[in-house]
Image (tube, helix red, strand yellow):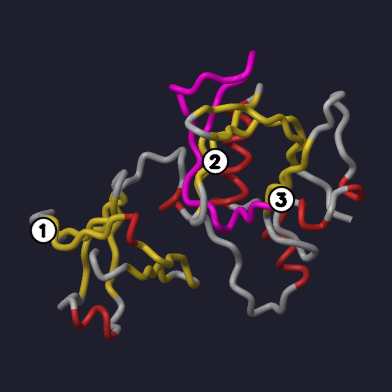
Amino acid sequence: MERPVKDGILYVQHCKFGKRSWRKMRAQLFAASPFGVARMEKFDVRDDGTVLEKSSLRRSGRRVIRLSDCVSVGPAGTESCPKATAAFYLTTMEKSYVLAAEQRDEWIAQLCQLAFQGTKETAQSSARTQPSLAVPMEENSLYSSWQDLTEFPVLVVQTDAADRCGLHGHYLLSALSQSLTLKDPQSRQPLLTWPYLFLRKFGQDQNIFSFEAGRRS
């Protein structure tokens, strides 16, 4: 049976008719394992403060956020929060959440660890359950929220898309706040820019990072 790596009370912000409010909920974080994906499970708290048991929830009412869909996690400094809490953002490819917790930094660190870095325990568990030729989980520094790296040397792999863009050889890839930018390695001048808003798919396959962009990118 899976055990959560973190369990506690969170508040989620809702906006209706222009008015913002906070709803109290119970949240549990699970690491990736042979029994399930890395995820956050959240469920409602009763009016009297007691927590609904998972077994009592309607199946359609169970809410799960797959951490593999996370794009960013970080503090939100301008939100008015419930007493003794601080707010943070959790952004996925489908939705952006504003959450609040008493131990905000711990929630952010744990979410980043599960979503972007993985854990040694997960890698060791996967090694025991997968064939010996399986590729071990690697740290993904491109999305690490606690590293200062923003520029990465890359080698463009020959594909139809690369040929259409006239790309080949070595470049610098900058992960900026609003976009990915490809630069000339010598002059460091921007060559191509892809706003995150128009990225449809991105990820890492072994040592190759790839993404798909919309026509307006």
Where residue 85 sits: x, y (%)?
62, 19
Instruction: Give the amino acid type for the residue marked by disc 1 in the picture.
Output: Gln
Q: Residue at x 30, y 47 (%)?
A: 178
Labels 3 & 1 near each other (Cβ < 8 A): no
Q: Position of residue 186 (x, y in %)?
A: 11, 58
In three-dimensional space, the C-alpha distance between marks 2 and 3, rounded to whole angstroms, equals: 13 Å
- Residue hosting label 3: 63
Identify the element where label 3 is drawn: strand
Query: Which of the two discs, 2 and 3, labels the residue nearer the N terminus?
Result: 3
Q: Which mark is residue 186?
A: 1
Give the left or right position of residue 155, taking residue 183 as reference: right
Residue type highlighted by circle 3: Arg
Q: Is residue 73 above or below residue 134?
A: above
Marks 1 and 2, the one that precedes in the sequence: 2
Residue linked to disc 2: 97
Residue 188 in the image: above or below residue 45? below
Which quadrant holds residue 16?
top right
Write the residue at 64% across / 52% down. Answer: 65
| Residue 71 percent across, percent down from the top left | 47, 51
For the point 58% across and 35% down, which residue is it?
A: 14
Which is more toward the observer, 1 or 61? Answer: 61
The 10 Å Cα crowd at callout 1, few under 14, some 14 to 19, many 20 or more, is few
In this rendered view, identify the residue nearer to me: 139 or 89: 89
Q: CA distance from mark 3 to mark 1?
A: 48 Å
- Farthest residue in the top direction? 83
Q: Which residues are magenta?
A: 63-88
